[in-house]
């Protein structure tokens, strides 16, 4: 596996951000005990797929670097909602699971061999999913992929981060040799779902919710940051290519 410094540089290049941002985010995460601590010489630390997922997630989803540890702690308790699955066979077939259970619905990933995601327990977080896709990204040979009739080839994989509600969406789409199309999506939110809107609740209710750890939004501005299959490929392969 790579060293912390090598991972920081790779993530910065892949996402197209400044090296300093990646390094500073790693430092605050390390000081909070959320990623592998460093070392020197033969005892130098080797990062894990979880470290990579944590760093990427913090960079893409937290509003400020200093808030990255708190954001990651909320992310580890996030659960899936609105699991959406469509499978277009010769006759269109729609299967919709609203995902009302507070525990994350399991991913089906029809025709895709992604055990690191498909075998996650029901009560998994968005961070678990990202780690699972990075593990898969290092094992899959995308460039030389040969699709068998029963298998599905991934055409698009997007991971988006919606602020200030801290919603993470995973979208996967693919097609097999018979041109059957597949799409699956699930979004994840911290405990309690969407942030409560501080403009529409009483002051006493706001104090109570904040005391319970629920984020409160106070404005109307929203933003979305996302990355694609390219990041999953690049970081996954990078981690697998390093000596273990």
Image: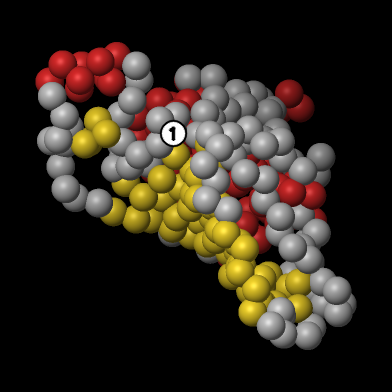
The colouring scheme, among rainbow, by chain, secondary structure or one colour, is secondary structure
- Let me know if residue 52 appears in the view: no
**What is the quadrant of the N terminus in the image?**
top right
Give whichever of 227, 170 is nearer the camera: 170
Where is 52 relative to 181, above or below? above
Up the image or down, 16 lies above or below 42; here it is below
- Residue 82 spot, x, y in % from top left: 50, 50
Q: Is residue 164 visible?
A: yes
| Residue 194 appears left or right of 129 | left
- Residue 145's place in the image compared with 54, above or below, is below
Q: Using the image as rendered, state which of residue 240 and residue 223 is in the foreground.
A: 223
From this view, report whether residue 37 is shown above or below residue 83. Answer: above
Residue plotted at (52% across, 50% down): 98
Instruction: Pick the quarter of the image with the C terminus.
Output: top right
The spot of residue 180 in percent (x, y) is 71, 80
| SS label for mark 1 | loop
Residue 120: x, y in percent? 72, 40
**Looking at the image, which is closer to me, 115 or 244?**
115
Q: Name the residue that disc number 1 marks.
A: 190
Provide residue 52's location: percent of width, then percent of height.
Answer: 60, 41
Residue beneath the point at 44% across and 29% down: 191
Q: How many marks?
A: 1
Residue at 76 percent of width and 78 percent of height:
176
The quarter holding residue 202 reads: top left
Count neighbours of disc 1 (C-alpha within 10 A) and say few if under 14, some if 14 to 19, many if 20 or more.
many
**Residue shown at 52% from the left, 28% from the top:** 77
């Amino acid at each position: 596996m790579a060293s912390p410094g090598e991972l920081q540089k790779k993530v910065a290049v892949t996402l197209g951000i400044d090296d300093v941002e990646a390094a500073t985010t790693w430092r605050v995460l390390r000081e909070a005990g959320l990623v592998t601590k460093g070392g020197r010489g033969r005892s130098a630390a080797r990062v894990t797929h979880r470290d990579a997922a944590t760093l990427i997630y913090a960079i893409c989803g937290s509003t400020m670097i200093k808030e990255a540890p708190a954001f990651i702690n909320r992310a580890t308790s996030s659960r899936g909602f609105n699991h959406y699955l469509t499978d277009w066979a010769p006759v269109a077939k729609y299967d919709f699971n609203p995902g009302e259970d507070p525990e994350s619905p399991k991913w089906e990933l029809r025709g895709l061999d992604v055990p690191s995601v498909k075998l996650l327990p029901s009560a998994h977080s968005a961070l678990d999913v990202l780690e699972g896709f990075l593990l898969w990204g290092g094992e899959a040979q995308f460039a030389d992929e040969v699709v068998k009739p029963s298998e599905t080839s991934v055409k698009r994989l997007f991971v988006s981060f919606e602020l200030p509600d801290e919603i993470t969406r995973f979208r996967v789409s693919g097609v097999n040799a018979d041109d059957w199309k597949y799409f699956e999506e699930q979004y994840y939110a911290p405990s309690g779902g969407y942030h409560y809107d501080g403009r529409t609740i009483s002051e006493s209710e706001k104090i109570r919710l904040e005391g319970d750890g629920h984020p409160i939004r106070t404005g109307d501005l929203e933003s979305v940051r996302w990355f694609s299959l390219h990041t999953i490929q690049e970081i996954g392969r990078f981690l697998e290519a390093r000596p273990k």
